[in-house]
Amino acid sequence: MATSDRCPRCGAMVLPQENFCPRCGAPLNEAPTAESVKEPLYGEGMGPEGMDYSEDVSSGREPASDGQTASDGQTASGWEPGQIPATIEQLRAFCDYHGMPLRQMRFFVGEDFREARAFGIYRDGDEFIVYKNKSDGSRAVRYHGPDEAYAVGELYAKLLDECHSRDLWPDGKPQGAARRQKGSKAVLIVTIVAVMAIAVAIVGFAVASDHRRHAHDGYYNLGDEGIYYRYGSDWYYEDDDYDWVLMYEDDAYDDAYADYYLGDDYDSDWGYSNFRSSDAWESIQEESRSSSDSSDDYSDWDSGGTDWDSDW
């Protein structure tokens, strides 16, 4: 049996009960000779594709994947948007980034969850287990081995499959993906034309409504009460700290347009600060960006749509 926790050929971590290295296949049950001991295939402490295994596992630190280190623009796990997760910590960072309610979704990252209807991954010593707990409570193990990147990849693929089946696309929705349609070509064309007409009408109505709603945006001189800014149906005023603050009486001064409107262009002669340079304006824009950019919504996730009776 092996007397070391590293393979004498490639330097990979091995378990005492293993007879062969799971990474390079070198025998571990005989003492190494001068001829059999070679330089590690990937360099000191390195594994395939430059994966660094030189960190002390007992320290609790995950090995850095693909030479990555935490830096500006990355999470502490080394994961950054657009990257495929390669470690449990990176998979957790990916899920956090997309706001996934993992328990509601029945995905357990880094947890040996034992109840029925669950997908999960966890670390057991130097090995990683990917599992599915079926509806009857029995467990199907998808992977059990030392390759963390492969194990994470298995659960990541299943997570994406479950998201895609609910029209959620955390990995980016494919553009122009061909969709199979039933029925004759004529029916298909009519359907497409009808849908496009409805879409155009909806967009046109939305644009017209938004235009009407913001037609009177701008600055108003309300006499002794000072200058206000109107955005849609909301009115803002500048407080003593020169911050623009929302008035909650949304319909206040709705009759002020004709008599008090100064315009939407800022004039420093008014003695007030520029509303469009204020924190209030930035908050409005941030809210607008969030509502338009966030196409994924996991709040209505229903795990009842998952096949809990199959092995995977």
Image: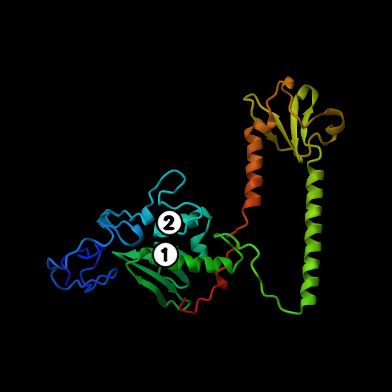
Outermost residue, front direction?
35
Tell me where residue 71 appears, x and y as whole percent: 41, 45
Depicted 68 relative to depicted 243: above or below? below
Residues marked 1 and 2 touching at CB (< 8 Å): yes
Q: Residues within 10 Å of mark 1 (few under 14, many from 20)?
A: many
Depicted 187 relative to depicted 107: above or below? below
- Distance from disc 1 to disc 2, alpha carbons, whole Å, reads 9 Å
Tell me where residue 143 appears, x and y as whole percent: 38, 72
Task: Name the quarter where the N terminus is drawn.
Answer: bottom left
Provide the residue designation for mark 2.
Answer: 90
The amino acid type of the residue labelled 2 equals Gln
Seen at 33% across and 56% down, the residue is 63
Tell me where residue 235 appears, x and y as whole percent: 74, 35
Q: Earlier in the sequence, mark 1 or mark 2?
A: 2
Q: Nearer the viewer, residue 45 or 77?
A: 45
Left or right of residue 222, residue 112 in this image = left
Which disc, if any, is residue 152? 1
Seen at 62% across and 25% down, the residue is 241
- The image quadrant that residue 155 belongs to is bottom left
- The image quadrant that residue 238 belongs to is top right
Circle 2: element type: helix
Q: How does the figure colour the protein chain or chains?
A: rainbow
Which disc, if any, is residue 24? none
Q: Nearer the viewer, residue 273 or 15?
A: 15
Circle 1: element type: helix
Depicted 39 relative to depicted 219: above or below? below
The amino acid type of the residue labelled 1 equals Val
Give the total number of marks visible in the rendering.
2
Left or right of residue 307, residue 151 in this image = left
Tell me where residue 252 appears, x and y as whole percent: 78, 35
Seen at 68% across and 25% down, the residue is 273
